[in-house]
Amino acid sequence: MEENLKKERGSEKGMERRRRVMVRGEVQDVGFRLFLYENASAMDISEFYARNIPEGVEVLVGGPDAEKFVAFVRDARFERGEIREVMAEEYTGKIMPIERFAQNFMLSQMSKFVSVGLDMLKTQREMLENQRKMLENQHKMLENQDKMLENQCKMLEKQDLMLEKQDKMLEKQDKMLEKQDLMLEKQDETVREIRALRQDLKAYIEERFAKIEREIAEIKSKLGML
């Protein structure tokens, strides 16, 4: 009987040493569970489990200093987050050994790191792909600019040829105008020569008529007709 009572009392004490602690506040993704684990390990807590829940963080602890750990959580000052409320109650279920939690926690954190690393690699690949596309677009733009410059050069060459042709045409026009000027000068000289010839001819004719009239007058005089 006494041995059975001792076993029952020991069992009751074991149950009393297991607690479920609910911590509400800004305590997720800020290293709060690692903070709790480190302090539980320092207090020689033998059973420990912590997980994120919608309200905050749920902690299960078991061991001789379970109550001490609960008191620590109530008075804890966590700089990277904010603890708004701590509630504790008895827990009669099983709790994994703290060493196993540590292993699982480290594995989960490593898995997160790997996932984050993969996401970062994916992001880097996407960034590199975007950069590659940007470089391709820049290359195409440069090619288009080169083509535009080539076209502009060809247009300028055509314009130069047109200007050269225009210059040649102007030169020809100048030569034609010079020829026209020479022709006009020759025409003026010819007109002057014709006018001079007409005056000479007129004087000659007048002189001839005058001579003829004098000869007629002499003939009349000799014939006694005057």
Image (cartoon, grey):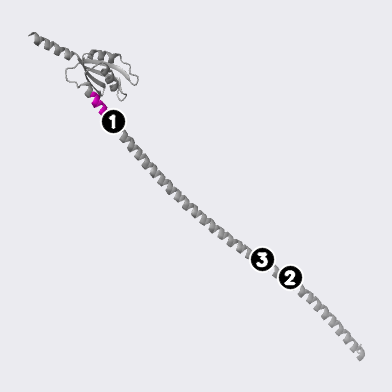
Among numbered discs 2 and 3, the one appearing first in the sequence: 3
Q: Residue at x 20, y 21 (%)?
A: 97
Would you name the residue on which mark 2 appears?
A: 188
Residue 73 location (% of width, % of height):
28, 16
Asked if residue 100 lies in the magenta stretch, the reply is: no
Q: Quadrant of residue 224?
A: bottom right
Which quadrant is the N terminus positioned in? top left
Residue 212 location (% of width, % of height):
86, 85
Q: Which residues are magenta?
A: 101-113
Would you name the residue on which mark 1 appears?
A: 112
Compared across the picture, whether 188 is left or right of 173 comes to: right
Between 54 and 146, the one lying in front of the other is: 146
Pointer 3 with pointer 1, Cβ within 8 A: no
Identity, as a three-letter code, of the amino acid under mark 3: Leu
Between 31 and 140, the one lying in front of the other is: 31
Q: Tell which tag, 3 or 1, sits nearer the viewer.
A: 1
Other-residue count near label 3 (Cα within 10 Å), few / some / many at <14 / 14–19 / ≥20? few
Mark 2, secondary structure of its residue: helix
Q: Residue at x 65, y 64 (%)?
A: 174
With respect to residue 21, does 203 lie above or below? below
* Label placed on residue 177: 3
